[in-house]
Image (cartoon, rainbow, N blue to C red):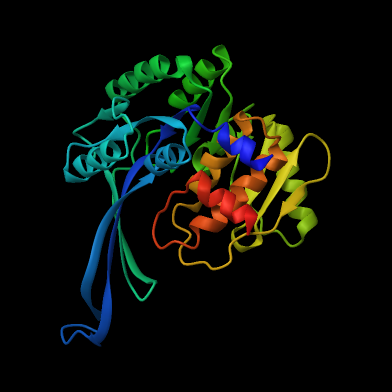
Amino acid sequence: MIADILERFQGKRVLVLGDVMLDHYVWGDVERISPEAPVPVLEVQKEEFRLGGAANVALNIRTLSGEPLLLGVIGKDSAANDIVHLLQEKDIATDGLVIDSSRSTTLKTRIGAINQQIVRLDYETKNDINLETMRKLLTNLEGLLKNCDAMIIEDYNKGLLTAKVIEEALRYAREKNVPVAVDPKQKNFMAYQGVDIFKPNYKELQTISGKIFETEAEFIKTARDFQHRMNIKNFIVTRGAQGMYVLEGIGGPIHLPTCAREVYDVSGAGDTVISTLTLAYISGADIFLAADIANHAAGVVCGIKGTASITTDQLLSSYND
């Protein structure tokens, strides 16, 4: 049954709307402290660039045999050039990217040694996109959404997903009967009324509710209250090492323990979850099976250093193991 669902991923068209990023990794060895300041000296051995944020969601759709249509905003800088090059390498169309020379492309540089991140440097513009950029984005969105099987909204709170963009995106999706899955951030948490899949993490749910959950029952009640208030069909809460919780309808939640055997890096695990979850859901799996498949996907990518994507073969191997 799992193999049948994974086979149906083939050719599914998924529009990915969200904050596009470039992940930059610098790895090396630390053997001494600098004489200039009490900081480690990293002797660089490896450096690489990977797709991040919404671009990593699109990459996961591609490696899982789907067809991603990426929609986002980049600047006019070297990071933007690297993103376009990486997308073209992976056969992901770049037509949906809007260039705004007044913004810098989001770049995250992670510096580490011996599988341990030392520091992260973020270069980004976080203010809301301007009116001209928004108009171009919405024009692209309306054109691309016509023949899609689903839309994923990947919100990293970098200024792309304004209230107007979200409102129009959800309106277009309703008009075209396209299911919507959302990976939210606190700022726009309540803007995604009525979507099919909503996937916050445990910490985000605590922050938006303004409380630290003392008990499991308090956490579940808060999640259920948000689900009902926002009229969400399927509410998924990820909890890192504790796996994920699936709330659907009025029954009790289903808890799926993590499938990760060894955790090297959680970077991009949420991107993989929303990609796999959405593809499984539109390929005939009910939300519980879709979440289980996504849980296996997260377990695989957490065992890979750096932002990662997954293939259907890796997913099937995880089940077989």
Is residue 61 depicted above or below 309 in this figure?
Answer: above
Is residue 7 depicted above or below 132 in this figure?
Answer: below
- Would residue 205 be seen by someone viewing this image from the given angle? no
At a point 29% along the width and 43% down the height, the residue shown is: 125
Q: Position of residue 230 (x, y in %)?
A: 67, 31
Q: Is residue 318 left or right of residue 167?
A: right
- Would residue 60 be seen by someone viewing this image from the given angle? yes
Q: Position of residue 67 (x, y in %)?
A: 43, 30
Q: Position of residue 6 (x, y in %)?
A: 58, 38
Return the residue nearer the eye: 29 or 88.
Answer: 88
Q: Position of residue 229 (x, y in %)?
A: 71, 33
Quarter that holds the C terminus:
bottom right
Is residue 259 depicted above or below 97 in this figure?
Answer: below
Return the residue nearer the eye: 287 or 142.
Answer: 287
Q: Residue furthest right?
A: 251
Q: Is residue 225 left or right of residue 99?
A: right
Give the number of callouts. 0
At a point 41% along the width and 63% down the height, the residue shown is: 305
Q: Within the image, what quadrant is residue 98 found in?
A: top left
Q: Within the image, what quadrant is residue 259 found in?
A: bottom right
At a point 55% along the width and 53% down the height, the residue shown is: 298
Q: Residue furthest top?
A: 175
At a point 33% along the width and 33% down the height, the residue shown is: 92
Quarter that holds the N terminus:
top right
